[in-house]
Amino acid sequence: MGHLFSSIETTPPSPQIEPLEPTLLPPCSINASSKSALLVEGDQSLLSCFRQLLEKAGYAVRLAPDTEEGLRLFRECGPFNVVLINYYVPEKKGTGINCLIPQIHGVRLAASIRDMNPSQGIIIVALDYQCASDVPRPAEVAQIPVLIETGNGQLRSLLEKIEVDRAIKGLTSSELLQLQLFAKFRIRGLGRAARGRDWEDLLEEALYRTLIGAEDTQNGRHWNRRVSFVQHLKGAILSIASVWKRQFKEESTYLMSELLFHDAEGQDYSLIDNVASSSSPADQRLIEKNEEDRVLGLFNDDSEALQLLRGLMDGLRKTEIMSRYGLEEKKYAAALRRIRLKVLSQRNNGSRG
Amino acid sequence: MADKTNHDGNLERFMNQLGDSVLALSDGNIRAEVSEAGVDPDGEAERTRTVLHEALQKLENVNRRLSNLGHTVNSNGWHRERSGYRNACVTCGSFVSFTPATGEIRGEALDGLCLQSDQYTIRRREASR
């Protein structure tokens, strides 16, 4: 593909880029905005269009009419939340381009920025192409997303992806551990309703809902930037776990092997044998009761943990548990810690969930 | 063996409260707790980041593959079904489905280029002639 970039025709200088029309949205201050964008676009109508789209999405936008100015602004003000570069942007102001042949200035700027800051989010705008694969570009920028449509939420989707990527990179190790443990306990709380899914599946699903919820709060879970990314993922995890639970209740069936147990003498018995037939979800409750007994059994030699555990199972709040069992703050925290450790280590021995 | 009291949701409530309690832990405490459980906290943290990054990448791969074929899907058009997500190209209507567990992409949209996409795209290249 290298030959495609070797011949550049220069057409007579195109008209100078006029100042933006006063009807456009007032520019946001870079310093006042939490999100910033660099827009490198030589076509005035596209520049206006993208500027409005970006500002509507909450970005303070720096404008560059050519790659030379784009590079200067990036060096001076970068990194930005996102850099949008038109594939056909000229190298210098007033230099025309020939849209009939592949250009190198836009992709060369993208490559330079990527070299300076490998984690900089970049989008190449190539509206003249039908498919992203048709856009001639060297291998080093092949991974940079290409925008071929201004409609259908493609830009918003790419911006959301860049923001989420940035948020993931920004998570601290303790935030990541919190998310993992939170998801692990949710999965354990689901029991059979998890249907073999583990914490990774739950966290992964939370991320998908975030990405597909860039515009839609019905299907996905839009990340409202007023909450932290951790809080957002926590909310998504809660919602997904609740949906999984509901789906399971609607469709639950049991294998006989799940209801059959052996006693110490090796005698088989069914949990259903001990249940009044009027109890509608009796089989499910029995399985839960069995698991509950197993967890309680882990703390037979730890009376404080056992008290706390019973309090939590009864849905009591921290102050209520402390008051009911006469536990002090420190003892409560220490017992809770022992419970978490034991429950997690039990799971660690059993499965990846 | 089994009693007849209502245990519905007891375990779930308990596990959920354990989960909530994790979010209130300080940075030092959560790392110490994970270490005490016999796990490397840095390794586990990075594993979690990898799960998130891989999910992002899987969806990005789907979008890139569709974009390379000229298909355009609404980012909010993905519908969750039993085994994965399903969407359709807004120009030609061909379907695509994506299974998160495996990252597998299927559907008629992958059979070839979106044949109708250039009917709807205004080409600056042509307009500039």
Image (cartoon, grey):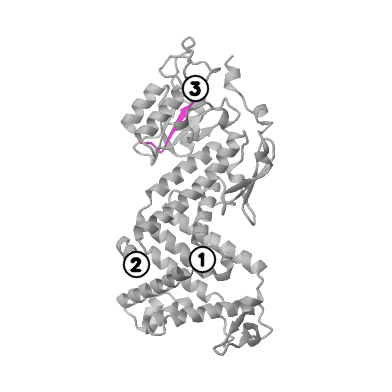
In the picture of the structure, the residue carrying the numbered disc 1 is A187
Residue A285 drawn above or below residue A352: below
Asked if the stretch drawn in magenta spans residue A51, the answer is no
Left or right? Give the position of A63 relative to B63. left
* Mark found first going from the N terminus, 3 or 1: 3
Determine the CA span between mark 3 and mark 2.
54 Å
Image quarter in which the N terminus of chain B is found: bottom right
Determine whether B86 is above or below A287 in the image: above
Residues drawn in magenta: A79-88
Task: Check if mark 1's residue and mark 2's residue have beta carbons within 8 Å.
Answer: no
Image mark for residue B33: 2
Q: Amino acid at mark 1?
A: Ile
Q: Where's the C terminus of chain B, which quadrant?
A: top right
* Residue A234, position as x, y percentages in the image: 46, 59
Check residue A83 for magenta coloring. Answer: yes
Residue A314 seen in this snapshot:
no
Disc 3 and disc 1 on one polypeptide chain: yes
**Residue on which the image places disc 3:** A88
Total numbered labels: 3
Camera-nearest residue between A214 and A18: A214
Chain of the residue under label 2: B
Q: Secondary structure at mark 1?
A: helix
Considering depth in this image, is A214 or A205 the residue closer to the camera?
A205
Regarding residue A272, the answer to whether it shows in the image is yes
Say which chain tag 1 marks. Answer: A
- Badge 2: how crowded within 10 Å, few (<14), some, or many (20+)? some
Residue at (43% x, 63% y) in the render? A181
* Discs 1 and 2 carry the same chain letter: no
Q: Which residue of the protein is positioned furthest toward the bottom in this rendering?
A: A265
Question: Disc 2 marks which amino acid?
Answer: Glu
Instruction: Tell me the SS state at disc 2.
Output: helix
